[in-house]
Amino acid sequence: MQTKNSEIKPKNDRSPLLWGLAFGIVFGFLLQKGGATKYDVIIGQLLLTDFTVLKIMLSAVLTGMIGIYAMKTLGWVELYPKYGSVGKNIIGGLIFGIGFAVLGYCPGTIAGAIGNGYLDALVGGLAGILIVAGLFAALYPRLNQGILSKGDFGDVTLPRLFKVNDWVFVVPMAVLIFLLLYWLERAGL
């Protein structure tokens, strides 16, 4: 029951934005310290001679996967996966892959490289992101009626697909990722 003095006020909590900013700064710092904002490291990964980027990304996946599912288990967050399709993955992969191969940066490393003062990231990377994002936004209505909707698989997750507890997938995946990271380090890659 709502009384005259208990009006509903819009939520003005900015703490999620501040947490996002803080984690973004930490992530950018770690990308920079790990060397992932350097063109030579990125190209080394593409040529399969330097696995620094793979190790950074696998570490991020491992940490994020355990953290997100732990928070979900504790009831701190609810997950709302985006609907996916084969068409979305193909178009997204092509856009990402072309930009990555041409410039040697991904969107996250472009931001870090700009922070390092790399002109190629600022001119080529930021301009590329803005131009391609603008083109994609302009073409989205037609793409969404065409290729983006092909092979729709919904908002499925592996635990949901197999109707099992999340940890049935998280634990084995965490072990596999950890073992792969250990092997890469031992092999000197």
Image (cartoon, rainbow, N blue to C red):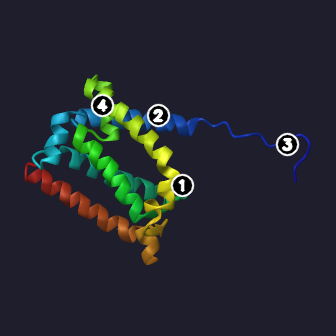
**Mark in front: 4 vs 2:** 4
Callout 4: few (<14), some (14-19), or many (20+) C-alpha neighbours within 10 Å?
some
Q: Mark 2 highlights which residue? A: 21
Query: 3 above or below 179?
Result: above
Q: For residue 77, which numbered disc appears in the image?
A: 1
Q: For residue 90, which numbered disc appears in the image?
A: none
Task: Look at label 4 and name its amino acid.
Answer: Gly
Q: For residue 124, which numbered disc appears in the image?
A: 4
Q: Position of residue 16 (x, y in %)?
A: 55, 40
**Mark in front: 4 vs 1:** 4
Q: CA distance from mark 4 to mark 2?
A: 24 Å
Q: CA distance from mark 2 to mark 3?
A: 33 Å
Q: Position of residue 106 (x, y in %)?
A: 30, 41
Q: Mark 3 highlights which residue? A: 6
Task: Look at label 2 and name its amino acid.
Answer: Leu
* Rendered residue at 17%/38% (across/down): 41
Query: 20 above or below 74?
Result: above
Q: Is residue 163 left or right of residue 185?
A: right
Q: Are marks 4 and 2 in contact (CB under 8 Å)?
A: no
Please tell me whether mark 2 sits on a helix, a strand or a loop: helix
